Image (tube, coloured by chain):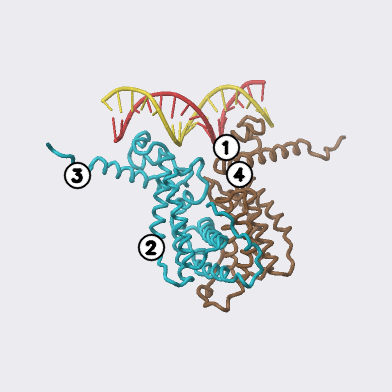
Chain colours: A brown, B cyan, C red, D yellow
DNA sequence: GTCTATATCCAGATAGAC
DNA sequence: GTCTATCTGGATATAGAC
């Protein structure tokens, strides 16, 4: 008897088409904003009729979810590539640079992953689990830079989000805010290390259980 | 002969209806996001048929523009109410508190005024002029707190936007990031005053012509 | 000023032939 | 798997009667 073929050619082709659709969806999202993603336009870009997409993704939400998961996976890889030498300053700067770079290089992806601007989209638990890993990884990296206070972590995410947002909204394609990254890392580090000199305004109960 | 009436009752009524429509539009925008604003829903809320709205606003864009102008006007009033005592620290904290409070109290308004997420909307020159006044006012207030370096101003706007964004996206209705405002003001002030101690990484040509 | 009726266009999604 | 045809519903905007 002849055994089953080792390679699943059908599955490979299907998987490739799914990736092609997903890439086309990113292109449309970059052009129209994530909220302006339309399946018709995606279909046209890959040379299919709109209903044919449903053979690959059950719904628009399923497609968005795949994009969300892919974005989180990419971020995970970037996070793993950040060098963690012993120096808090360079570590913090490297993390900040990676994160702001990741966000500003694709505003549509930033919108899908971190803003709440998409109409009725909610990631599936499977995809969200990857986002959780992103946050846990960040937590570890900040700890490596000496930042463990939840309030300080929140301050870091605020600065990262702020640099990203201003760069995207007010100087797209430029570097008016991204060039402040090293300055911002210094500022954050000084702030986190200057606890003793200032009155403990809100340090008695800094964060409570962080549920992000 | 009888002169013209002193009060323009017709004009007053019309103006009131325009305001009513605008308020209904804000409600819809808060519910669906600014991008999800639909004239049908606005009309239903004010008890009119959709085409009747066109007697008050020439287009959806005209309505959005009126909302944009109104938001900028409100911000202008808030800005004028910020106390500018001589102390840089309390001044900076007051400005930051006002701004982040203004943004977080109405995310839809923040979206319309400061994000670029609305499909094809561009404010008219008249409305945009108010936004320019907002920025000029901010510039003056930061100067009163001793911040005049454009790079430091950009850092301020980044921190303000970051606190706002994180608060809205990850803790809507809470205070996980807004309670960091005083800390952030201290951090910013320390940073702007610590010029001499650090190497002038990017202070030789800090900002170039700021065109925001 | 408000209405009905309509124009035009787009969206996501499904049925069923091939 | 892909297609044609269609369903359902939504959008902005205009024409013209009253």
Same chain check for tags 2 and 1: no
The answer, for residue A165, to whether it is visible in the render is no
Foreground label between 2 and 1: 2
Chain letter belonging to callout 2? B
- Is residue A112 left or right of B4 when viewed as pictured? right
Q: CA distance from mark 1 to mark 4?
A: 11 Å
| Residue at numbered disc 2 | B81
Residue A64 bears which disc, if any?
4
Q: Earlier in the sequence, mark 1 or mark 4?
A: 1
Chain letter belonging to callout 3? B
Residue extending furthest right? A1
Foreground label between 2 and 4: 2
| Residue at numbered disc 1 | A38
Residue extending furthest left? B1
SS under mark 3: loop
Foreground label between 3 and 1: 3
Tell which of A75 and A90 is nearer to you: A90
Same chain check for tags 1 and 4: yes
SS under mark 4: helix
């Amino acid at each position: 008897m002849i055994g089953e073929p080792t390679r699943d050619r059908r599955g490979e082709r299907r998987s490739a088409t799914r990736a092609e659709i997903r890439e086309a969806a990113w292109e449309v999202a970059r052009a129209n904003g994530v909220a302006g993603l339309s399946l018709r336009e995606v279909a046209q870009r890959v040379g299919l009729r709109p209903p044919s997409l449903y053979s690959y993704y059950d719904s628009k939400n399923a497609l968005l979810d795949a994009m969300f998961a892919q974005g989180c996976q990419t971020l995970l890889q970037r996070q793993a590539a950040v060098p963690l030498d012993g120096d808090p300053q360079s570590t913090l700067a490297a993390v900040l640079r990676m994160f702001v770079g990741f966000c500003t290089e694709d505003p549509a992806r930033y919108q899908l992953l971190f803003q709440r601007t998409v109409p009725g989209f909610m990631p599936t638990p499977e995809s969200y689990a990857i986002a959780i890993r992103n946050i846990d990884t960040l937590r570890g990296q900040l700890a490596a830079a000496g930042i463990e206070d939840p309030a300080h972590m929140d301050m870091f995410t605020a600065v990262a989000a702020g640099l990203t947002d201003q760069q995207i909204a007010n100087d797209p394609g430029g570097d008016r805010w991204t060039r402040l990254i090293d300055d911002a890392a210094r500022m954050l580090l000084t702030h986190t290390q200057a606890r003793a000199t200032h009155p403990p305004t809100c340090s008695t109960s800094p964060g409570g259980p962080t549920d992000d």
